[in-house]
Image (spheres, rainbow, N blue to C red):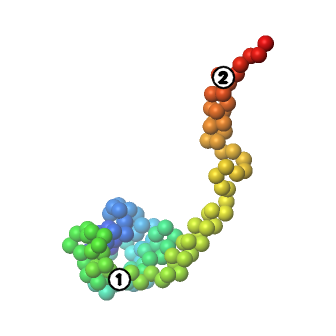
């Protein structure tokens, strides 16, 4: 089975096109070597997938006949991704939270438009007391 089809079948990518693109960009390695999308994979191969800034490691148990349901994925592969990779993702998430929080700092373009809309709405209700 082709590597792009395998990654699609075990639900690492939503479409085969995405899996093919990842192979072309060098995000997929089989047994330590970067591969093309047409590379054949076999049981017992080690695959490394770089996706969402996480390096997933998996070992092929068997080749699925077609795309399988999420509950059946573990029959066809063993996920050997170290827990440190997921912890690094959590730290990255916290680092992004460090930056501008909603409602603080200089207004964004959307904030400015909302303020102008609010001012325009309130101008209709001004009463002249003369």
73 or 13: which is nearer to us? 73
Q: Is residue 31 above or below residue 38?
A: below
**Circle on res. 125:** 2
Residue 50, percent from left and from top:
46, 72
Q: Secondary structure at mark 2?
A: loop
Q: Secondary structure at mark 1?
A: strand
Between circles 1 and 2, the one closer to the viewer is 2
Q: Which residue is mark 1?
A: 78
Residue 90, percent from left and from top:
56, 71
Using a 10 Å C-alpha cutoff, classify the residue at mark 1 as few (fewer than 14 neighbours), some (14 to 19) or many (20 or more): some
Q: Is residue 112 above or below residue 1?
A: above
Residue positioned 62% across, 63% down in the render: 96
Using a 10 Å C-alpha cutoff, classify the residue at mark 2 as few (fewer than 14 neighbours), some (14 to 19) or many (20 or more): few
Residue positioned 35% across, 82% down in the render: 78
Residue 49, percent from left and from top:
43, 74
Q: Is residue 79 above or below residue 53?
A: below
């Amino acid at each position: 089975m082709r590597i792009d089809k395998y990654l699609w079948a075990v639900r690492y990518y939503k479409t085969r096109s995405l899996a093919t693109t990842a192979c072309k960009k060098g995000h997929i390695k089989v047994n330590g070597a970067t591969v093309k999308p047409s590379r054949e994979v076999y049981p017992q191969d080690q695959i490394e997938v770089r996706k969402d800034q996480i390096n997933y490691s998996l070992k092929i148990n068997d080749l699925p006949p077609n795309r399988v349901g999420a509950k059946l994925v573990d029959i066809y592969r063993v996920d050997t991704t170290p827990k440190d990779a997921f912890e690094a993702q959590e730290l990255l998430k916290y680092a992004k939270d460090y930056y501008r929080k909603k409602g603080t700092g200089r207004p964004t373009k959307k904030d400015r438009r909302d303020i102008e809309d609010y001012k325009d709405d309130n101008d209709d209700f001004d009463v002249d007391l003369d």
